[in-house]
Amino acid sequence: MFWEAVRRAHDEEMARDENVICMGEDIAVAGGTYKATSGLYKKYGPERVIDTPISENSFTGIGIGASFLGIRPIIEIMSVNFAWLALDQIANSAAKIRYMSGGQLTAPVVIRTPGGTAHQLASQHSARMEKVFMGIAGLRVVTPSSPRQAYGLIKSAVRCNDPVLINEHELMYNLKGEVPDAEYFHPLVGSERAREGKDVTLFGYNISTHWCLKAAETLAKEHGIEAEVIDLYALSPLDRDGIRESVSKTHRAIVVEEAEAIVGVGAEVIAIINEECFFELDAAPVRVSAAHTPIPYNRKLEQAAIPHPEKVVEAGLKMLGKN
Amino acid sequence: MSLSLDDKKRLLREMLFARRFEERCYEAYVERKVGGFLHLYPGQEACCHGVLEAAKPGSDYVITSYRDHVHALKCGVDPKRIMAELYGKETGVSRGRGGSMHIFDISRRFMGGYALVGGPFPLAAGIAKALKLQKRDEISICFLGDAANNQGTFHETLNMSALWELPVLFVCENNLYGIGTRIDRSTAVLDQYKRTCGYDLPAQQIDGQDVELVYAAARAAIAHVRAGEGPFFLELLTYRYRGHSMSDSNAYRKKEEEQRWSKRDPVIILRDRLVGAGVFSRNDFKAMDSEILDFIETEVIRYAEESPEPKVEELLQGVLATDDPWVKDGATVGRKE
């Protein structure tokens, strides 16, 4: 399961290098809200597996400061909503330090944080912040859609000399999927073709990759449309080549994002399509995005605010003139 | 252990150098050779010099705010390369990418100047956490102003530093003003050292204008931290002669207040003490001064003036690691072709 893959990556990296530590709220004695660090406290002790007070900005800053001296902290921000509080240290310290020190210092921290719209968690616990992180120069942003990616991305992120933000999803920790038995490092750049197709490209990432796959299945079975699904596990930098290659083949693009459309992943991907392969397009690219509202508590309202596979199917049919 | 006469003469020279360096930065700013924001240190010299005289500059890790030139100097950073940084030159310590507020020299363990008030608190504690994990003898020293104590990072970091017994010395240079607002208009508790009792963190307040007093207090504080007894907070009462930055008209302060503090000038206090002890004459001081002024002009300024600017073609370089194998090649499964 997803949480086991996350845990395994922590365990392997901590066993290999005693400079790897992990820190966050409830991650040590309690083992993490999603069990992603369970057992590590017992194995590696309180100096390396650290329960922090609820002080997101400063414990993130402490991890960053430690990374200046070669420590490799994996910082868990329990919910991405709390990462708003840590943005000062993420943006001003971690992301800028390499550039503003003329290359003398780097902040090789990994910041893992689950977000997304889960089960009626309401306005202040349903944030999707990937667009915020993507806008920060000097920060790598990745987002796994499978246990394999989660494992491999954490492994690579720990060893990478840049700060890496790993955007996880609260609904995905029990997701099942194959993870290689052998040690595996996932690249921090690029994209993956999750499904081969020729009629339209559905761009997804993290949970929206699963919506795309489901929609592609419906489109194929019920409408004879072969949709390609590109999984943008790297959000910053985005895979310009992968985006261009797929759109040049299918000539149509739909970007599916759990967040609001404004200043988002879809806006960025469509801008890249315009810049890279505008004349390959047979239809104007569209976004399937969340409503531009705070996420409401009521279940029906909540579900209406975010995309679903059905909305992706609808967008695909419309684009291909079949509705 | 107190300072020897030779130590005091050297300290006087260093403090006078710092004063003249900062005044020359002011001139360069007025001449528009230096851009951006410029925060100057005159008036506060005894703070940084007294504390770091008791530490091991170049070995201990030092971090501070945007008012950072003199802390860098005392850590042994080359004044030519600091000035070149202010001039935005490629030969500057941060290759012209940082400017006055972002002086870095890792070879001297000067971990930088940061421009968000209170931002360095957690970074200093993080450095201390690393030192503790790596079982090293060095300590982390964080210099910030009184106004930084009104940021959340002060409280959050003091709490964690005390809780985890981190080897960090927090030095509060209380110069009575946060930008242009006097401390009694911004802060409920005027004595900053009292604010640490909420974290059971030992603290002391001392006159920050007398470098010998600062040195003695810092020695005890550093001994505490180095012995592994956890963090210490040292408050130094001081005053800056200039505004918060060069964009500050400094109109919010009374002339009488400025005059009162100018009578407690840290350079003059030490000079008069040495003259009084009969080991140093006023003429010696004048000779020292002109030698410093000459060095700044012929070496420091000339170096900054003559150095090349960064190449515009290199604008995009150095944002992310480019040669990092884990970004791409470390992968056994990449994008499926």
Image: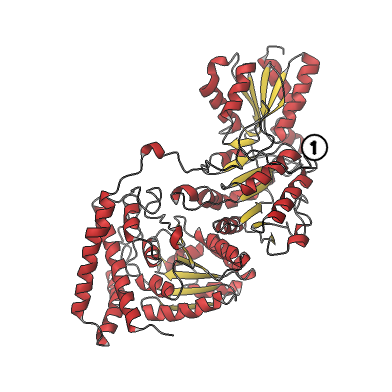
Q: Report x, y in % for residue B251.
A: 30, 61
Q: Is residue A17 above or below residue B160?
A: above
- Label 1 amino acid? Gly
Q: Report x, y in % for residue A103.
A: 46, 49
The answer to whether residue B246 shows anywhere in this view is no
Between residues B92 and B102, which one lies in front from this camera angle? Answer: B92
Q: Dot 1 surroundings within 10 Å: few (below 14), some, or many (20 or more)? A: some
Q: Residue at x 47, y 79 (%)?
A: B219
Figure quadrant of residue B122: bottom right
Q: State the quadrant of the C terminus of chain B.
A: top right
**Residue furthest out toward the left:** B283
Figure quadrant of residue A39: bottom right
**Residue furthest out toward the top:** A321
Figure quadrant of residue A245: top right
Q: Residue at x 51, y 73 (%)?
A: B233
Q: Which residue is mark 1?
A: A177
Q: Is residue A266 above or below residue A88?
A: above
